[in-house]
Amino acid sequence: MLKSSLLSKHKDYFEAVIQIRPHSIPVLDFIKKAVSKRDSVFISRVVSHKYGDDIYISSQRFARSLGKKLKDNFNGELKVTRTLHTRDRQRGRQIYRGTILFRLS
């Protein structure tokens, strides 16, 4: 059953991007399997580039924890950054989008 917060978000909504460099099928399968276990998290889109893949995920917190799991399970480098996206008018807070770069060695 889907949570009400998930139903209110459109299909293109994302809070974080996981970048996989270079392209790796086992890493993509690991991410898809981990996301399928969580009801409140979904993948908005997967974009393939010639140098790797970008996976757009609806939860920044889950994406950060998934980056740590990738580093533990696969041999590679992890870099976590965030970019200012907008400002919440009601609460006066700044809203960030995260970028998790996982580079296989």
Image (cartoon, rainbow, N blue to C red):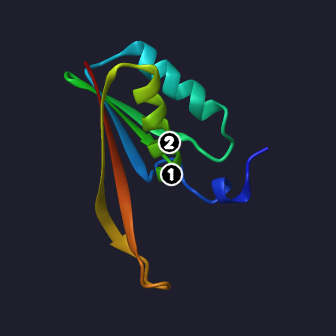
The residue carrying mark 2 is 65
Identify which residue is drawn at 44% across, 36% down: 68
Q: Amino acid at mark 1?
A: Arg
Q: Residue at x 35, y 16 (%)?
A: 24
Q: Quadrant of residue 52?
A: top left
**Secondary structure type for disc 1:** helix
- Name the spot of residue 42 as percent of width and height, x first: 56, 41
The answer for how far apart the CA atoms under marks 1 and 2 are is: 6 Å
Please report contact status of discs 1 and 2: CB closer than 8 Å, yes or no: yes
Instruction: Give the answer, above or below, for where 62 lies relative to 91.
Output: above
How packed mark 2 is, by other alpha carbons closer than 10 Å (few <14, some 14-19, many 20 or more), is: few
Judge left or right: residue 53 versus residue 51.
right
Q: x%, y% of residue 36?
A: 63, 31
Residue visible at 25% across and 18% down in the picture: 105
Q: Is residue 59 left or right of residue 21?
A: right
Residue underneath mark 1 = 61
- Judge the density around disc 1: few (<14), some (14-19), many (≥20) Cα neighbours within 10 Å: few
Q: Which mark is residue 69?
A: none
Q: Which residue ends up furthest to the front in the rendered image?
A: 72
Q: In the rendered image, which quarter contains the N terminus?
A: top right
Q: Is residue 64 left or right of residue 53?
A: right
Asked if residue 9 is positioned above or below residue 35 in the image, the reply reads below
Query: In the picture shown, does residue 23 fall above or below 5?
Result: above
Residue 80 drawn at (x, y percent): 32, 46
**Residue in the picture at 42% in, 41% down:** 56
Q: Position of residue 59 (x, y in %)?
A: 52, 50
Q: Secondary structure at mark 2?
A: helix
Which of the two residues, 103 or 23, is positioned nearer the viewer here?
103
Tally of numbered discs: 2
Q: Is residue 32 above or below residue 25?
A: below
Under mark 2, the amino acid is Ser
Residue situated furthest left in the rendering: 51
